[in-house]
Image: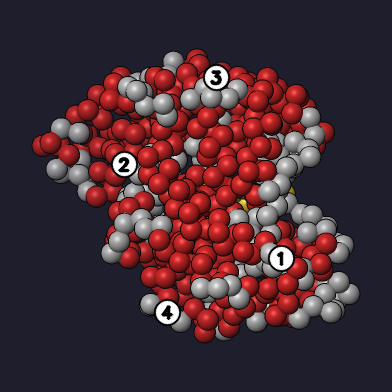
Amino acid sequence: MSELFDQLKTKLDRSVALSAALALFEWDAETLAPEEAADHTGKVIGILSEDYFKSLINPEVKSLLGRLEQEENYAKLTLEQKATIRELRRTYKQLASIPSKEYADFCELANKSSSVWAKAKKNDDFTLFEEYLKRIVDYKKQFASYRVTESSEGNPNALYDVLLSDFEPSLSTKELDEFFELIKEKLVPIIDQVKQKQDEIDDSFNTRTYEIEKQRKFCDFISEYVGFDRKKGVIAESAHPFTTNFHNRDVRMTNHYDENNLISTIFSAIHESGHAIYEMQIRDDLTLSLIGGGASMAVHESQSRFYENMIGKTKAFWEPIFESLKETYSKQLADVSLDQFIRAINKSMPGYIRTDADELTYPIHILIRYELEKELFSDQITVHELPKAWKKKYKEYLGLQPKTDTLGVLQDIHWSSGDFGYFPSYAIGSAIAAQIYYFMSEHMDFDTLLRGGNLDQIKAYLGEHIHQYGMIYGMNELLFHMTGERFNPEYYVRYLTEKYTNLYGLDA
């Protein structure tokens, strides 16, 4: 190992430790922390955030990074070390332009903002959250402006492109505009056809009353069934399900339980398990390092969506375990057959809530958020106008107009912590999942494995080709190494077209 890199690694180890500590506070804030903790805890987070900032952005790290990027030194590095240098340079560009005090103040605000968002959502009152969101947006605009280059002059989406790069470096608004145009062109006509056949699938059993405690037990079972390792992970409860990790042997996920929406609860558990399995299978030599996380947010979402949809919504997956679900809810599901259940969990019907959306309408929920974020960061709309703009777009794209902000602009936690540019990762992740699914289908018999309850082989395959590498490769590199192709959204269109044409008997 390079002596220079050894010196740098000592510095990076401190930043990774501080990042893990901040992640622990985030986990605690969403799960166990008391309601009034946010203000004082926010100050602690601000101090730790400033220390994290300074652990990376300082003259010593800058000097070592510059020297390691010199050709004669860079050539001596391993693949993993080169990836670390790449990610450090990306992180350095992201943070170095921001004054450390501003960064710390923002982190303190974001912690408080998330608790205010939760209160606003509970009380269906956007005005409680509006001023916090405005301050968050102002910070993110300012931070993005520090990083806009001269080459972006004249680009109305320059600020937003900077934010997008934090989550998926491979894509900008140019590529995303093309992706969402394809979605609108190919999928909206199918959605319109399916709307006419909504009543053909009976999912009325889903709104019966399902005891929360039984949901917890069944969801714990199904998480472990798909591959969540209890020796390396913890499952808790939060207002908005999420997964975080401190390293590959301490991965935390949450779920949210609704006694009148069994399907949502089950598939939230499978979705978050997909995220967790990814983190658990990152190599030991990469975890607790700058490249010890998922390749990108889109790749991470591809794994959760793969488990949730390509595995969890198939009949073959449920054949070995459906009776366990019926035994858990013997009264509520007594009249529900496996075939009815499978059709119900795949039913397509426009709805208000992104996390409850079916596969066909899901990318439209993301399209709406993408367009709103672009408009917000190009000053076409203001924070105050967001609730009205949200309702207008839902009416335009899905024929629905949320009557409350809880069902509308307040439903997602992401904006409260400043995660603008994150949402497109969900749609891109779904598309990557379809691409991976078609490739893997050529190498293994999915249905036979699922009917036998043998998910270990699928988990191992994903671990070998995706998970173990952490952030060594970017999205397109990872896909090319695995499938021989870069990102290709045509697989996503094919997957959804085939699935819903067959499910609803549409004209091909």
As drawn, 142 above or below 317 = above
CA separation, marks 4 and 1?
34 Å
CA separation, marks 3 and 4?
49 Å
Compare residues 242 and 100 and report the one nearer the observer. 242
Image coordinates for residue 388, horizontal then vertical, percent: 69, 31
- Sort mark 4 into few (<14), some (14-19) or many (20+) by Cα contacts within 10 Å: few
Sequence-wise, the earlier of marks 3 and 2 is 2
Q: Which mark is residue 138?
A: 3
Compare residues 52 and 431 and report the one nearer the observer. 431
Q: Is label 2 in a helix, a strand or a loop?
A: helix
Q: Is residue 439 visible?
A: yes
Residue position marked by numbered label 4 in the rendering:
444
CA separation, marks 1 and 3?
42 Å
Sequence-wise, the earlier of marks 4 and 2 is 2
Dot in front, 3 or 2:
3
Dot in front, 2 or 1:
1
Residue type at mark 2? Thr
Q: How is the rendered protein coloured?
A: secondary structure
Dot in front, 3 or 4:
3
Sequence-wise, the earlier of marks 4 and 1 is 1
Residue position marked by numbered label 1 in the rendering:
198
Residue position marked by numbered label 2 in the rendering:
84
Task: Name the quadrant of the N terminus.
Answer: top left
Q: Do tag 3 and tag 2 residues touch (Cβ < 8 Å)? A: no
Residue type at mark 3? Asp
CA separation, marks 4 and 2?
34 Å
Left or right: residue 160 compared with residue 75:
right
Q: Is label 3 in a helix, a strand or a loop?
A: helix
Dot in front, 4 or 2:
4
CA separation, marks 2 and 1?
50 Å
For image coordinates 54% across by 45% down, the residue present is: 367
